[in-house]
Image (spheres, rainbow, N blue to C red):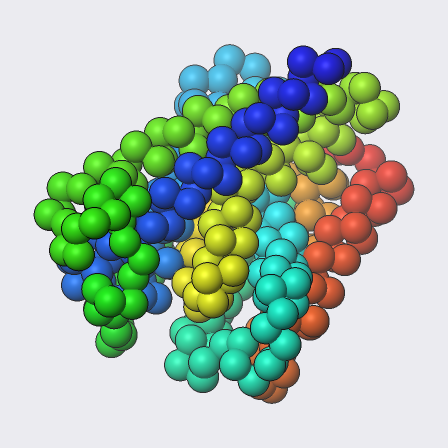
Amino acid sequence: MTTTILLLLGSAVVIYLACEYFVNGVEWVGHQFGISKNATGTVLAAFGTALPESVVTFVAVVFGHSPAQKEIGIGAAIGGPLVLGTIAYAVVGLTFLLSQRQADASFLPRQAAHRLIEDQRWFMSIFVFKAVLGVVAFAIKPWLGALFLLAYAAYVRQEMSAAGDAGSAHELEPLKLRPRDPMPARIWPLLQTGAALVVIFLSSQVFVHQIDAIGPWLGLSPQLVALLLSPIATELPEILNAVIWVRQGKQTLALANISGAMMIQATIPSALGLMFTPWMLQHALVWAAVVTMLSIAGLYLCLRRNALTPRAMTGFGLLYGVFALGLFFIPLQG
């Protein structure tokens, strides 16, 4: 157990350090390719950190030989948005408060709030649709997976074409691989970002395996570990990206990264699940979908009423506790 804990802590530290290089590199990539700050968070950063999880889902649903293995993919498609919609948003608010940025009015610019509202509309529409598909059975359901891929393509097109400031080089911290170069060649940000992603992916696998090993030690069944702890582990890069960006005073990028990652989780894993599994949600996953929608609906209402503050965001993390409590009263299967 000592080795497991050391590997858990060590991999978490490596993930955080790799995220420092990733957020630094992806900002430079966005700047040098003329991509707006919002799209840098919702598309570039989100796709990079969510790609490893989507690969895991792909392997589980396409190459899994048992129903249990395929259930892993379905659980990831539901559990990922739950963690991002509760814990990740709460981490943004808590980090902002701990960074002693107490002026709520400066927490989120109006334009960024408007973009976040649009993201929640996209997410809620898609997520409700995929949750409903998980409780009904009909012959053409697998073909509907293509709709989710088209939805994500439409979202990316909108984000990339939306007006926005790409930022100037003097607003960026020096590229970590070229700290004395005021304008590094494009290859360097791409290299730094790609290398950081590889380290994040490998370290995340180590972290997830240690979480799976610690679960029985805590008295949790494999099903509870898969529903409660594993999603937190797989979403750790997005959460740590948010911590880093908020500490730098770039909460707009942090929130864009989370909302963009949620869109990926709502579409690509769902498309794979629909195409390669029966896509029937167990009771516990239906409960996870309900809690996710409660959190996003609350966030949406706060944004619409111009009432989203760091303290309000911190409160969304309590909903993950509500989800965990509900699992003890809901059958994990059936």
Q: Which residue is located at x 63 percent, y 70 percent?
A: 100
Q: Can residue 234 be seen at all in this image of the molecule?
A: yes
Of 136 and 244, the residue lying toward us: 244
Q: Is 28 displayed left or right of 95 in the figure?
A: left
Q: Which residue is located at x 36 percent, y 44 percent?
A: 22
Question: Residue 83: x, y in percent?
Answer: 62, 48
Of 170 and 139, the residue lying toward us: 170
Question: Residue 292: x, y in percent?
Answer: 64, 56
Q: Which residue is located at x 54 percent, y 34 percent?
A: 13
In the rendered image, the residue lying farthest to the right is 329
Q: Can residue 132 be seen at all in this image of the molecule?
A: no
Image quarter hosting the N terminus: top right
Question: Residue 33: x, y in percent?
Answer: 15, 57
Q: Is 80 displayed left or right of 323 in the figure?
A: left
- Residue 40, image quadrant: bottom left
Q: Which residue is located at x 69 percent, y 34 percent?
A: 229
Tell me if residue 201 comes above or below residue 138 in the rendering.
above
- Residue 312, image quadrant: bottom right
Q: Is 64 displayed left or right of 149 in the figure?
A: right
Tell me if residue 248 comes above or below residue 10 in the rendering.
below
Image quarter hosting the C terminus: top right
Tell me if residue 130 comes above or below residue 192 in the rendering.
below
In the rendered image, the residue lying farthest to the front is 180
